[in-house]
Image: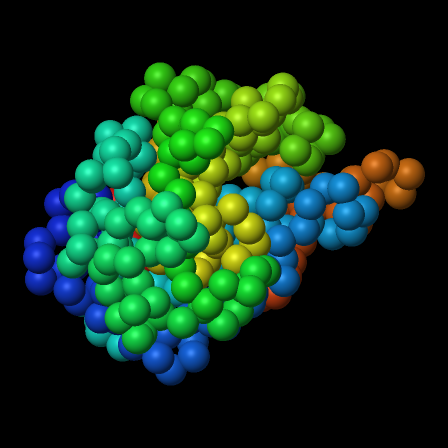
């Protein structure tokens, strides 16, 4: 049966409790940290000269669709009522927005060390010890808006600009691609400082703390953020039914991206599924 992913602002109090309880149970059993490790293992930049699947590559969107679906499946094994909600950061763009409530994701980190002190994912709750990370911190950290180097969340106008792209991706299929929906949504750009980070990337920067690294999955807001990114891709697919995943074929020998990106019908690590197999989610879930 097809289930529905809802805007987090539309969740009932009971739905919030159900989601949080399932995430905490997955953490207790060790399953949550497996997702953290998977993301860290596949957080490869285009400067490393090897295969990229999760970031800075055309497979950014199908890779995270599969990753999110696997996480959701794990939660639904715990409680079949659960679906991962989405956070529309063009609307809920304040530290006082509903997702940061104490009964849901908790709030910002404290000034001294950025440690989150409120909500069910605070270290002090005894249920959210960071054990798989790219830092030595054992507590969840956030730094909303990065006050020392201020940054704002993406706006509706900026997202509309991304939605006007007509090609899924363009050569050289990495963080320097000047156009194409994938790189515009992922948010790699030229310039200095915060100008280099747009849309998806800027959300990670705005939250700060754990969300700045490959260990970003340690913050449960990661899933709500990527649920919205997936929704945006889904809407773009509906608007552009003829604009399918690119590249269709693997870059040839001699191309700078040879064996560094995944083509439409090639398998993505670590699952062995292809980008093409993830185009249509309508038989699994829908967005409210």
Q: Is residue 218 left or right of residue 274?
A: left
- Residue 197 point in image, percent of width and height: 53, 30
For the point 40% across and 59% down, the residue is: 140
Q: Is residue 34 visible?
A: yes
Q: Residue at x 32, y 22 (%)?
A: 156
- For this orientation, the residue located farthest to the right is 254
How far across and how far down the image is residue 123, in percent? 34, 67
Q: Quadrant of the N terminus?
A: bottom left
Q: Is residue 210 left or right of residue 74?
A: right
> Which of the pair 281/200 is nearer the observer?
200
Q: Is residue 223 above or below residue 287?
A: below
Q: Residue furthest left?
A: 13
Q: Quadrant of residue 255?
A: top right
In the rendered image, is residue 69 in sight?
Answer: no
Measuring 35% from the left and 79% from the top, which residue is drawn there? Answer: 28
Quarter occupied by residue 173: top right
The quarter in which the C terminus is drawn is top left
Vertical placement of 178 versus 110: above or below?
above
Q: Give the x, y percent position of residue 121.
A: 30, 63
Q: Residue at x 31, y 47 (%)?
A: 108
Q: Is residue 17 left or right of residue 241?
A: left
């Amino acid at each position: 049966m097809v289930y529905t992913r809802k805007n987090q602002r539309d969740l009932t109090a009971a739905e919030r409790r159900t989601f949080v309880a399932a995430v905490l149970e997955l953490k207790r059993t060790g399953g949550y940290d497996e997702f953290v490790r998977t993301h860290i293992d596949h957080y490869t930049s285009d400067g490393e000269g090897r295969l990229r699947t999760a970031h800075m590559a055309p497979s950014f969107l199908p890779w995270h669709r599969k990753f999110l679906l696997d996480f959701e499946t794990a939660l639904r094994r715990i409680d079949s009522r659960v679906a991962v909600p989405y956070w529309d950061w063009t609307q809920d763009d304040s530290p006082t927005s509903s997702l940061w409530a104490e009964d849901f994701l908790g709030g910002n980190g404290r000034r001294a060390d950025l440690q989150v002190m409120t909500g069910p994912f605070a270290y002090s709750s005894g249920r959210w010890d960071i054990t798989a990370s790219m830092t030595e911190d054992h507590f969840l950290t956030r730094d909303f808006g990065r006050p020392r180097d201020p940054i704002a969340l993406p706006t509706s106008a900026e997202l509309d600009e991304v939605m006007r792209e007509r090609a899924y991706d363009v050569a050289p299929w990495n963080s320097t691609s000047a156009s194409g929906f994938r790189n515009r949504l992922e948010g790699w750009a030229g310039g200095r400082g915060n100008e280099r980070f747009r849309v998806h990337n800027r959300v990670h920067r705005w939250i700060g703390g754990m969300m700045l690294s490959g260990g970003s999955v340690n913050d449960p807001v990661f899933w709500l953020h990527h649920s919205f990114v997936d929704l945006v891709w889904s809407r773009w697919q509906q608007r552009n039914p003829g604009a399918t995943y690119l590249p269709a074929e693997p870059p040839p020998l001699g191309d700078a991206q040879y064996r560094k990106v995944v083509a439409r019908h090639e398998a993505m690590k670590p699952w062995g599924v292809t980008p093409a197999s993830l185009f249509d989610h309508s038989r699994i879930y829908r967005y409210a």
